[in-house]
Image: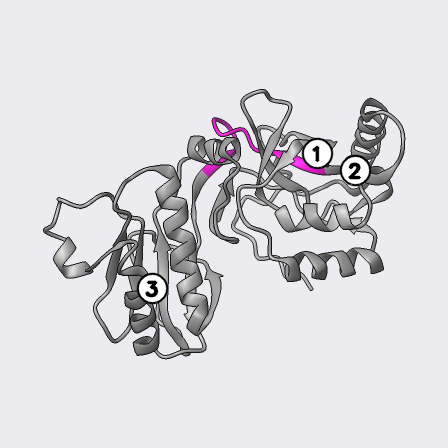
Amino acid sequence: MKVSHPYFPEMTIVPLERVYFHEEIVERRAKEIFQTMQTHPLLLNPVIAMPLHNDKNYVVLDGAHRCMALRMMGCSSVMIQVAHPDRDVSRFGTWAHAITECAPAQLYDVIRTNLKNKLDLRSHDRMLNDQSGSPLLARLYLPDRKNLDIRPRLWDLNRRVEGLHVLFNACKLVGSVERIPITDHNQPPKTYDGMAGWIQITPLKLEEIRELVARGMRLPAGTTRVVLSVRVLQVNLPLEFLRSEGTLGDRSDHFKTWWLESINIHQGRYYEEPTYIFEK
């Protein structure tokens, strides 16, 4: 039985100069993608980007390092899947982050030392009945100690972003920070061997992401997690489309022709069930 989705996501190419980031870039990660593109000059998956208010510029929700790698490859454009918040975004949140390569006691001490003069730190138990503080910025889960609620002393966007950078930088002083998925946002991540603790961040709203771009601010890398109603994968767009000369209109027409031919030839599948994809 052939199953089709009620709509196909909007796909287009836009100049890289019209694509903005809301998270920091990890140079090592961008170089890894660049090296892969040198060997295989393809853009495997489209970048996920949300229109800004003027609908001419976009903010990247997933794929900032791919954009940086494309710039390193000399490309002037990028293929994006447009994420319209009212239609395409099923859930917008944050990744949990695991801190490894240190002991829980080390993590606890460095957090207390580096954050105590900049953010409010209180045990999770105490904050359950304390409504006097500002809203929660993040929660640090420690397997063998009480959890810590972390709050900015003033609740505004600038203080929240600054607070997250202070928190992540403190964790990196003693260990390695990596993002991990969670399935229940009301529960902390499960305990894994080698983890000293986990951070769960209070998500920003999509409008706040737009405001970040307007202010020229960025969150720590790997913070934002977006779940789409439909995501297009394994497109394998040749990079020649993204670094060819000519007007944007010419390149867009060329891309649309190639895209329609690819759909007809490859007969892309729509999977209704959750799907694992293993990428090298």
- Tell me which residue sits at (72%, 31%) in the image: 14
Percent of width and height locating residue 78 = 73, 38
Q: Amino acid at mark 3?
A: Asn
Residue named by callout 3: 114
Percent of width and height locating residue 216 = 53, 37
- Tell me which residue sits at (40%, 36%) in the image: 205
Residues drawn in magenta:
79-90
Whole-angstrom CA distance, mark 3 to mark 1, is 37 Å
For discs 3 and 2, the disc positioned in front in the rendered view? 3
Percent of width and height locating residue 156 = 33, 37
Residue 76 marker: 2
Is residue 194 placed above or below 208 in the rendered structure? below
- Tell me which residue sits at (60%, 28%) in the image: 7
Residue named by callout 1: 17
Percent of width and height locating residue 65 = 65, 51
Q: Give the mark nearer the N terminus: 3 vs 1.
A: 1
